[in-house]
Amino acid sequence: MDNPESSTPKSPTPRRWGWIAAVILSFLGLCGLLAVVYVGLVRVQQGPVAIGQPAPRFTLTSFDGQTLTTDDLRGKVVVVNFWASWCLPCADEAEELEQAWQYYKPGGEVIFLGIAWTDTESKSLGYLEKYGITYPNGPDLRTSISQAFRTTGVPETYIIDQDGILAYVKLSPFVSLGEIISVIDPLLDR
């Protein structure tokens, strides 16, 4: 007579279950990595945020501890400038941006925000002191703000109108105070 136990299939051993679990986890990890790469490639191909679209919402904690959110700034024209202490073209426009800030500051209708991109705090603070920049500036922690704007480098400036719509994009340095004023003034005359 045949042994009935020999005709039933054996269940996988614990060792085999470990191997199966490792294969499944590896497959899931690979799928996750591919999803991250795909999202990154799609964002790169999109280019910067387009004029006429709602500007990305973000929160900036300035170097002096002030927290600013785009929601809190609704009703003002917001000038968002991405810069770095090691960026020579950023230094070229620093004086003009500060002059523009001083020009608009008394009216209270325009706010300038500087975003230090991939920079150390000590070098950023040195840059701000060197160029006498007094408008709010803060670090782009984990590059979350620059990713939201899909920046391609520095300097880049995004101007948001009073309704939170992106009104202007400059992917190079401003060359004069007059150039900055020519972009902002039409937004205030609406």
Image (cartoon, rainbow, N blue to C red):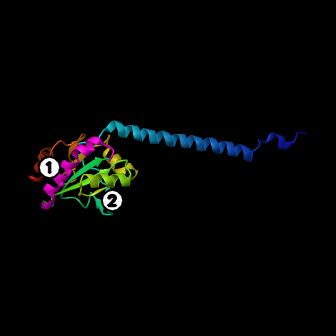
Q: Secondary structure at mark 2?
A: loop
> Is the residue 51 above or below the residue 138 in the image?
above
Of residues 188 and 65, the one drawn nearer to the viewer in this rendering: 65
In the image, what residue occupies the spot 43% across and 38% down?
A: 38
Main SS, magenta residues: helix
Q: Position of residue 145 (x, y in %)?
A: 33, 50
Residue 92 in magenta stretch: yes
Q: Secondary structure at mark 1?
A: helix
Residue 175 in magenta stretch: no
- Looking at the image, residue 53 sits to the left or right of residue 122; the answer is left
Q: Position of residue 40 (x, y in %)?
A: 40, 40
Of residues 181 and 31, the one drawn nearer to the viewer in this rendering: 181
In the image, what residue occupies the spot 18% across and 48% down?
A: 96
Residue 134, picture quadrant: bottom left
> Between disc 1 and disc 2, whose residue precedes?
2
**Amino acid type for the residue under numbered disc 2:** Phe
**Amino acid type for the residue under numbered disc 1:** Ile
Query: What's the mark number on residue 37?
Result: none
Residue 149 shows in the view: yes
Specify few, some or many for label 1: CA neighbours under 10 Å numbering under 14, 14-19, or 20 or more.
Answer: many
| Separation (CA) of disc 1 from disc 2 | 25 Å
Q: Which residue is mark 1?
A: 184
The part of the chain drawn in magenta is 85-106
Q: Which residue is mark 2?
A: 63
Of residues 166 and 142, the one drawn nearer to the viewer in this rendering: 142
In the image, what residue occupies the spot 68% across and 42% down?
A: 19
Residue 52 shows in the view: no
Q: Quadrant of the N terminus?
A: top right
